[in-house]
Image (spheres, helix red, strand yellow):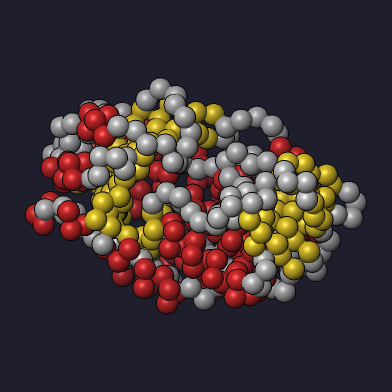
């Protein structure tokens, strides 16, 4: 089958790699003139790593990623541990694959290598899709530079501002959540030894604000994402903001958090608006479908946005191998994926309320009642995209 994928991010490349392995003719069209990821790190739990294993990336991930020992949820000021989710050996033994923290760029490079090893001409750059039309036999795609292409199947993997989505679901823009996210990274060596976090993913929870910290690049860099309730502002991962505002947002926080704020490059502080969409259950036509943020953008509070896109890619490739007509395969795909991704979207949104509770006693009770470890180990991490049943 001739497949066109709009969007060359993590989800688009994962889909391309899975489909190329099955023998499909795949072309990925990316609007950027150079292929690469922006942002810092992502977390890959066992549910997504099983797909990376299928693509032959285990050895590569071992060389570039970090395996955290646990999630630790801490109070913002005194560091009290509110809840722990074991990771490390426990996660791998229970779910059949490791848990990794990895720089987005490194994951993107790994996926790109797989795609190009399967077809060196699979990726086209500088191609912004502007018009899509569907017929009974195919899909026509026109680009901003006047060029065009055709496909039997079009996959929209073009993010939260997806062009493809407009032809499948709606033209409504995403909605601002009332929260923004700081993004910084810092060489670990800059942080005083006594203030370096343990090899965990630590979530520091405070009034209307929380911060997530974890290592990447084999422990040489520390990733910091701080999510603050603020008025609307420009939505861009590349927008720099004054260090003084970052400093103010985290004034009075624990010394481990402050060690990052105080030692980061003052001109390398990025902040963007966090937008969201209501989950939908139908995201395909007869020859067009969506994956990842194009259909179910997810707040970063469960560390599952990239993982859901990778799961989508694997399940979509598997349903396309079924002996059914394409429209039926796409219907099966969305029926399998929509309920799970909707749950991730909703629970990620709920986490903002949990992490931002002001009163300490109330926060303690809330974490105890949620029991995140039992929940995520019960339904989120055990999912296997490569073996989930496709036919009910």
Give the quadrant of residue 182. top left
Q: Position of residue 181 (x, y in %)?
A: 38, 37
Q: Is 390 on the left-hand or right-hand side of 98?
A: right
Q: Position of residue 21 (x, y in %)?
A: 65, 74
What is the count of numbered marks? Answer: 0
Give the camera-side residue of 234 and 87: 234
Q: Residue at x 30, y 66 (%)?
A: 218
Determine the residue located farthest toward the left in the rendered image: 194
Give the camera-side residue of 367 and 43: 43
Q: Position of residue 23 (x, y in %)?
A: 72, 74
User: Which image quarter is the C terminus in?
Assistant: bottom right
Q: Residue at x 21, y 57 (%)?
A: 188
Q: Is 53 placed above or below 327 here? A: below
Give the quadrant of residue 152. bottom right
Give the quadrant of residue 150. bottom right
Q: Is 237 on the left-hand or right-hand side of 229?
A: right
- Residue 105 visible (yes or no): yes
Q: Residue at x 31, y 43 (%)?
A: 268
Determine the residue located farthest toward the top in the rendered image: 231
User: Which image quarter is the N terminus in?
Assistant: bottom right
- Residue 283 visible (yes or no): no
Q: Residue at x 42, y 49 (%)?
A: 39
Q: Position of residue 371 (x, y in %)?
A: 33, 47
Q: Is 299 placed above or below 1 here? A: above
Give the camera-side residue of 43 and 47: 43
Q: Is 123 placed above or below 247 here? A: below
Q: Is 234 on the left-hand or right-hand side of 62?
A: right
């Amino acid at each position: 089958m001739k497949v066109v994928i709009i969007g060359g991010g993590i989800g688009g490349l994962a889909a391309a790699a899975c489909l190329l392995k099955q023998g499909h003719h795949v072309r990925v069209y990316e609007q950027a003139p150079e292929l690469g990821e922006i942002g810092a790190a992502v977390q890959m739990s066992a549910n997504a790593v099983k797909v990376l294993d299928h693509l032959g990336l285990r050895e590569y991930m071992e060389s570039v990623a970090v395996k955290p020992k646990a999630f630790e949820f801490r109070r913002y000021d005194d560091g009290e541990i509110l809840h722990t989710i074991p990771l490390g050996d426990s996660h791998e033994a229970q779910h059949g694959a490791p848990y990794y923290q990895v720089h987005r760029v490194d994951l993107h490079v790994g996926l790109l290598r797989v795609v190009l090893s399967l077809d060196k001409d699979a990726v086209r750059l500088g191609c912004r899709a502007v018009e899509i039309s569907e017929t009974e036999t195919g899909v026509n795609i026109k680009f901003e530079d006047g060029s065009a292409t055709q496909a039997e199947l079009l996959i929209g993997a073009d993010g939260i501002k997806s062009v493809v989505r407009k032809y499948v679901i709606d033209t409504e823009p995403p909605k601002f959540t009332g929260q923004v996210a700081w993004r910084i990274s810092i060489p670990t060596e800059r942080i005083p030894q006594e203030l370096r976090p343990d090899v965990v993913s630590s979530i520091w929870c405070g009034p209307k604000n929380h911060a997530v910290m974890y290592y990447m690049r084999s422990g040489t860099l520390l990733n910091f994402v701080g999510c603050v309730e603020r008025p609307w502002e420009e939505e861009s991962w590349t927008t720099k903001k004054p260090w003084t505002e970052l400093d103010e947002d985290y004034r009075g926080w624990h010394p481990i958090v402050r060690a990052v704020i105080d030692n980061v490059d003052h001109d390398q502080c990025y902040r963007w608006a966090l937008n969201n969409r209501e989950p939908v259950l139908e995201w395909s036509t007869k020859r067009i479908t969506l994956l990842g943020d194009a259909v179910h953008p997810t707040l970063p509070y469960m560390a599952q946005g990239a993982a859901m896109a990778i799961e989508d890619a694997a399940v979509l490739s598997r349903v396309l191998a079924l002996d059914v007509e394409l429209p039926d395969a796409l219907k099966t795909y969305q029926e399998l994926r929509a309920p799970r991704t909707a749950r991730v979207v909703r629970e990620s949104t709920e986490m903002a309320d949990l992490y931002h509770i002001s009163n300490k006693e109330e926060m303690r009770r809330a974490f105890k009642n949620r029991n995140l470890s039992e929940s995520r180990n019960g339904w989120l991490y055990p999912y296997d995209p490569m073996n989930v049943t496709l036919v009910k």
